[in-house]
Amino acid sequence: MKRLLFVLLTVILLASCQKVTVEQTELTPPIIKTSLKVGTLYGSQVYVKTGQGDAGFDYEMATRFANFLKLELEMLPYSNIGELYKALENGEIDLIAAGLADTKNRREQFRLGPPLYRVNQVLVYKQGTSIPRDISQLKDHITVTTDSSFVETLSQLQKLYPELLWEQEKDKDSEELMGMIARGELTYTIADSTTFDINRRFMPELRAGPVLREKQAIVWLIPPKNSDQLMSNLLSFWHKEKRKGTLAHLNEKYFAHVKRFDYVDTRAFLRAIDNKLPKYKDKFIHYADGIDWRKLAATAYQESHWNPNARSPTGVRGLMMLTLPTAKQVGIDNRLDPEQSIKGGAKYLNDILKRLPESIPDNQRMWFALASYNIGYGHVEDARKLAQSMGLNPSAWRDLKEVLPLLHKRKYYKQTRYGYARGNEAVHYVDSIRRYYDTLVWVDNQNKLMEDEEARQEETQMVERSSEESEALTGAQPQ
């Protein structure tokens, strides 16, 4: 009997404990997630801050993913890859979006998202260095970023070439190492092909050697544990964006136009930024009227190389190479006057932008407008209609640039209202302006970094002078 009473009392106590636990749990406020914390690294194709806002392939995808989850995006840049790994392991961030490649070591440490795009790993050296046919013929060691996928590649290659040597830089990324190559401070490094293509526009002395690894997927990293829901959401998001064409659009936006490279033209443009642009920069800024002045300046360079007296055999003249009818249309009476030319070119571009259909996204409207500036609005509309008839998106630049070259083929232009056009030249024209624009943005950012560093040094010197003066005054006082 006593034993039965003991059992009953035990059951009652356990039930009451469970009830208290439930009640306490119900009283504990649930943790509501309001933001997606994304760890990243600064880089031209990953994440950059510009005067026109944040940009980068990974940044744009992260923004879309946060919207997909209905969360605010917190983009958190770290100094190096090792710090990113620690932040993810410590739960400080939800995922890593930093242009990192799919490697065996990373698969063992993290869960990897689906591929965003693919790259080749290339050996990078400076023009004038003897061209190595393969990795066994290097005359100096290679320098790469610590924890990068390049370390794993070199470790594999060392099994074939035991004499292969390399050094690791913890606090320098691929872009910084390529800068050291361009300055002659290093002999060799390794870079992803996309990073190389982007940076040789600013450092035309860079050269690409042997491809060390082909078609490596760039992915996001997420925690290996307690991340099933995040992975499920990421896969759903990826499939949705791939079907929408977002991945193709971003690939075209960040990488397609940089594949063309002209060493002489790039060097000439960098010299012109120093020698010619200062004469006209204020006017580009003044008359831009909503257009990023650097896009206006890039257009002028493509048109005339910033030569106010430029003239073509077809009769276009001046800095912005306006036709006589266009000059009259925008109220310009002297096409050879630089200020009038810039004012007229800016007005004409803005007029085209206003005419474009609203279906064209804001971030692509300028490329449509520039194509119209080059070959005429009517031909661009022909290409849009042709794209639609072919099942392509007439409001996506990546599709239109595939269709425009067809306008010089009779099979296609006979279907159009305005007929024959050199559409392939329009594509090249727009791609060139985009490269010039990117270079102007890069130069602006470099100048800002230098100004910030000079201001910091000046502030430090002022503090030191103030301290010295204070010490001198204190020492001069009678004891």
Image (cartoon, helix red, strand yellow):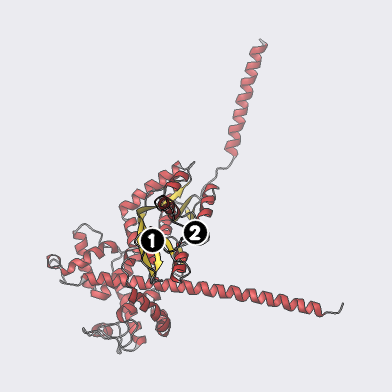
Residue in the foreground of this view, choosing between 417 and 251: 251
Q: Position of residue 242 (x, y in %)?
A: 33, 52
Residue in the foreground of this view, choosing between 157 and 93: 157
Q: Residue furthest right?
A: 479
Which labelled disc corresponds to residue 137?
1
Under circle 2, the secondary element is strand
Under circle 1, the secondary element is helix
Residue at x 52% of width, y 74% of height: 450
Which labelled disc corresponds to residue 440?
none
Q: Position of residue 343 (x, y in %)?
A: 35, 83
Position of the N terminus by quadrant: top right
Residue at x 31% of width, y 75% of height: 351
Residue assigned mark 2: 167
Residue at x 47% of width, y 65% of height: 176
Position of the C terminus by quadrant: bottom right
Q: Mark 2 near mark 1, Cβ–Cβ under 8 Å?
A: no
Q: Above or below — where is 170 with respect to 446?
A: above
**For the residue marked with disc 1, what is the amino acid?**
Gln
Residue in the foreground of this view, choosing between 330 and 322: 322
Q: Above or below — where is 144 with respect to 159?
A: below
**For the residue marked with disc 2, what is the amino acid?**
Glu
Residue 136 appears anywhere in the view: yes
The answer to which quarter of the image holds residue 466 is: bottom right
Q: Position of residue 326 (x, y in %)?
A: 26, 82
Q: Position of residue 395 (x, y in %)?
A: 28, 63
